[in-house]
């Protein structure tokens, strides 16, 4: 690990991090604020008017408890997509950004092995996602406790967020792998954005039911099941395991590819 | 002692050879020029030295360490100036220099400040807004600030104005005095001539020749463009035992190999309007080696 590089990345990312976090916070606070029995009745009516549309974003069965309410409105779309945007931008910047503009030459022309450089960047990516999700989790808990004391099932909520972190760990691993192995920034952006978005769309279409339902077993998002996580269902354990494995494999492969690859700098 | 050693280095892209069987030996304290036109394989060779590329065949060593395996170890005593000028955007020159120094674990920035002063670099502005020459200076400071034993420079003078080029040449000569081993690529023969002890000439991925600058100079022919007062003078001059090429009614080009002494007394007998030295281009040098079928030493 190179701490100079880590510090540099921290300073260079703080702006993007804050923007993403601010948007997330805004939504989280408004969603928590919206939780009250009457309001959820209105939302239920809305769902009844266009069930397919709402189902696509995972908002089909609105529960009565606060945690079910949150998982429906936050963990079906917002907390999947916004961290994804953050990861894609960061993963591409951390490796391919330097290769594409040529400044990687200066980084690896210092007495640091390529492994050290790429490991630092991978660590930074994972740590950023972890901090982002920890902050939102903590904020949700605090805000819920202030507005609705003792309403939130904290254990279930933590499990849900651990699942979310593992999901994003796996996807960020994929993005990082693309960033390490592509030939230029454009290709890197295309693949690291295209595949997760495609998966998400398939998942959304699958949620709408009908003949497309089977499709969603082909996407990584099927390994993130909020209901099972909240219920601490035994199958959620192997789903977490699978996500962890995918993430680890991607990161390990990414590091290997970067250490071995030809660099035209 | 051999500082840089390149053995049978070959890099293939698909069916195309970027470089083929390149062999080089550079000794301690030597300034080695690497001469060749654009796309000849200069940068590819340098990228192998830096460990950026995996050779298809062959290996290269710096101070006996494999360039591909011991990259971090090698970087401790090496300075590098990339051929492409690229830095991290959103940083000022000073921030970047400090950042790279920290990445090197270098805390003493006195040399960096000396260099900035020498090259008249004001690095307080954003790199993004700097001119090409200023960026090149930032790169030079990064390459030399840790007093490296060996320096690898990929086209160091590109972007520098003539005044700075002269200053750079003086700087290289001073580094040579200090005993630094320097490997620099260029497509300008003049700057190689002024600084280097030996030169390697590469074309189309192959080393055409490696020889000392003294030999190169001896072999290099000089061309003079002479304008005579009138046509009679020229036709009289054509009788002289020189390689003369008539290019106009009163103009001719004379090619002299080695000593110019023979030409000057002869010219004194003629009425001349103008005399111009035509600097020899890289192509001329290559032609010379092609005619000879390439000598390898």
Image (cartoon, coloured by chain):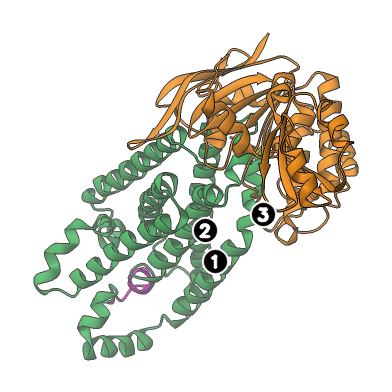
Chain colours: A green, B orange
Residue visible at 85% across and 20% down in the picture: B178
Residue depicted at 39% across the width and 36% down the height: A252
Q: What residue occupies the far left of the structure in this picture?
A: A211
Direction from residue A32 to residue B279 in the image, left or right: right
Which residue is painted at 39% across and 54% down in the image?
Answer: A168
Q: Nearer the viewer, mark 1 or mark 3?
A: 3
**What separation in Å lies between label 1 and label 3 (alpha carbons)?**
16 Å
Task: Give the SS element for disc 2.
Answer: helix
- As rendered, which of B143 and A54 lies closer to the eye? B143
Tell me the SS state at disc 1: helix
The image shows residue A151, relative to residue A42, as above or below, that is above
Residue A71: within the magenta?
Answer: yes
Q: Residues within 10 Å of mark 1 (few under 14, many from 20)?
A: some
Judged by its main secondary structure, the magenta piece is: helix
What chain does mark 1 sit on?
A
Mark 2 and mark 3 lie on one chain; the one further toward the N terminus is 3
Region of the chain picked out in magenta, as a range: A61-73
Label 2 sits on residue: A132
Q: Chain of mark 2?
A: A
Q: Earlier in the sequence, mark 1 or mark 3?
A: 3
Q: CA distance from mark 2 to mark 3?
A: 15 Å
Mark nearer the N terminus (2 vs 1): 1
Image position, residue B149 (x, y; %): 74, 21
Q: Circle 1 sits on which residue?
A: A21
Q: Is residue A21 depicted above or below A218 in this figure?
A: below
| Left or right: A192, with B250 as reference point | left
Residue located beneath label 3 in the image:
A11
Residue B141, quarter of picture: top right
């Amino acid at each position: 690990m190179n701490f100079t590089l880590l510090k540099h990345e921290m300073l260079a990312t703080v702006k993007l991090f804050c923007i993403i976090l601010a948007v997330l916070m805004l939504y989280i606070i408004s969603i928590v604020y919206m939780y009250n029995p009457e309001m959820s009745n209105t939302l239920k009516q809305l769902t009844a008017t266009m069930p397919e549309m709402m189902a696509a974003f995972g908002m089909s069965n609105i529960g009565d408890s606060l945690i079910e309410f949150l998982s429906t409105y936050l963990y079906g779309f917002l907390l999947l997509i916004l961290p994804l945007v953050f990861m894609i931008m960061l993963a591409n910047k951390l490796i391919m950004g330097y290769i594409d503009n040529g400044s990687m030459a200066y980084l690896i022309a210092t007495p640091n092995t390529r492994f050290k450089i790429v490991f630092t960047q991978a660590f930074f990516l994972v740590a950023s996602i972890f901090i982002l999700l920890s902050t939102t989790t903590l904020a949700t808990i605090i805000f819920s406790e202030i507005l609705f004391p003792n309403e939130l099932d904290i254990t279930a909520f933590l499990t849900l967020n651990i699942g979310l972190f593992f999901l994003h760990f796996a996807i960020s691993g994929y993005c990082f792998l693309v960033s390490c192995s592509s030939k230029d920034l454009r290709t890197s952006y295309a693949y690291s954005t295209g595949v997760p978005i495609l998966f998400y769309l398939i998942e959304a279409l699958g949620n709408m039911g009908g003949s497309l339902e089977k499709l969603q077993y082909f996407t990584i998002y099927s390994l993130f099941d909020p209901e099972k996580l909240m219920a601490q269902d035994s199958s959620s354990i192997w789903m977490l395991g699978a996500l962890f494995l995918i993430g680890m494999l991607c990161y390990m492969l990414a590091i290997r590819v970067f250490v071995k690859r030809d660099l035209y700098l | 002692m051999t500082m840089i050693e390149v053995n049978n280095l070959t890099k293939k892209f698909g069916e195309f050879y970027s470089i083929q069987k390149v062999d080089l030996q550079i000794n301690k304290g030597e300034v080695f020029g690497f001469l060749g036109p654009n796309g000849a394989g200069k940068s590819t060779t340098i990228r192998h030295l830096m460990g950026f590329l995996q050779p298809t065949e062959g290996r290269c060593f710096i101070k006996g360490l494999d360039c591909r395996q011991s990259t971090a170890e090698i970087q401790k005593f090496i300075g590098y100036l990339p051929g492409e000028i690229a830095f991290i955007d959103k940083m000022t020159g000073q921030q970047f220099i400090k950042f790279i120094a920290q990445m090197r674990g270098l805390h003493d920035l006195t040399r960096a400040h000396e260099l900035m002063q020498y090259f008249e670099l004001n690095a307080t502005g954003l790199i993004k807004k700097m001119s090409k020459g200023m960026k090149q200076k930032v790169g030079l400071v990064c390459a030399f600030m840790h007093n490296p034993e060996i320096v690898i420079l990929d086209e160091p003078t590109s972007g520098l104005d003539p005044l700075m080029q002269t200053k750079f040449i003086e700087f290289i000569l001073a580094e040579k005095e200090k005993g630094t081993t320097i490997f620099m690529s260029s497509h300008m023969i003049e700057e190689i001539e002024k600084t280097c002890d030996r030169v390697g000439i590469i074309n189309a991925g192959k080393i055409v020749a490696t020889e000392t600058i003294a030999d190169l100079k001896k072999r290099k022919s000089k061309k003079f463009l002479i304008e005579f007062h009138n046509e009679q003078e020229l036709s009289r001059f054509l009788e002289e035992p020189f390689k003369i090429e008539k290019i106009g009614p009163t103009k001719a080009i004379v090619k002299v190999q080695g000593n110019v002494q023979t030409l000057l007394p002869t010219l004194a007998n003629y009425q001349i309007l103008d005399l111009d030295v035509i600097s020899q281009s890289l192509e001329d040098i290559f032609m010379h080696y092609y005619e000879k079928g390439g000598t390898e030493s």
